[in-house]
Amino acid sequence: MHRTFYHITHEGEDESNRKPNFRRMERIRFPKFIIENCKHNDILIWKNKRGKDERVLLLNEAENYIVILTDRGEYFMLITAYYVETKHRKEKLVKEYKDYIKAKTA
């Protein structure tokens, strides 16, 4: 759990050298709220693969916030959650969602 908290409140590619991110810290309550309200129309939900893990992504477009879970079969584990800071990153996530929906309905 400590690693997940650290990942949610800090940023950076190098795990041993992550920096505190106050935007992430301000939103520490968002993951629970988004998970509990995942059926709301503002939450985009899709799946992707990262290595051997199937990930479930929940994007709140209105708040620019994403929650990433991994499916462990009997339960879902929180991997990370963060504020999507750039327009480009948000557009990339929305495109991934649309591509997922398109492939699922094809």
Image: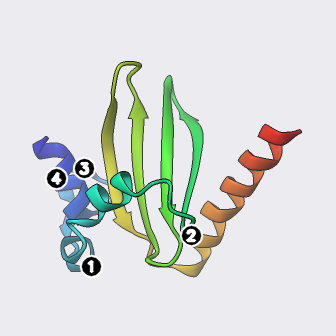
- Residue 23, numbered label: 1
Considering the numbered disc 3 on the image, is that residue within a helix, a strand or a loop?
helix
Q: Quadrant of residue 82?
A: bottom left
Looking at the rendered structure, the kind of residue marked 2 is Arg
Of the two numbered discs 3 and 1 on the same chain, state the one appearing first in sequence: 3
Q: Are marks 4 and 2 in contact (CB under 8 Å)?
A: no
Q: Residue 92 versus residue 74: which sits nearer the camera?
A: 74
Give the Cα separation between the discs numbered 4 and 2. 22 Å
Give the Cα separation between the discs numbered 4 and 3. 13 Å
Give the Cα separation between the discs numbered 2 and 1. 16 Å
- Left or right? Give the position of 86 relative to 25: right
Can you identify the residue that label 2 sits on?
Answer: 89
Looking at the rendered structure, the kind of residue marked 4 is Phe
Considering the numbered disc 1 on the image, is that residue within a helix, a strand or a loop?
helix
Can you identify the residue that label 4 sits on?
Answer: 5
User: How many tags in the picture?
Assistant: 4
Report the residue at 25% width, 72% height from top.
27
Report the residue at 21% width, 65% height from top.
29
Report the residue at 77% width, 38% height from top.
104
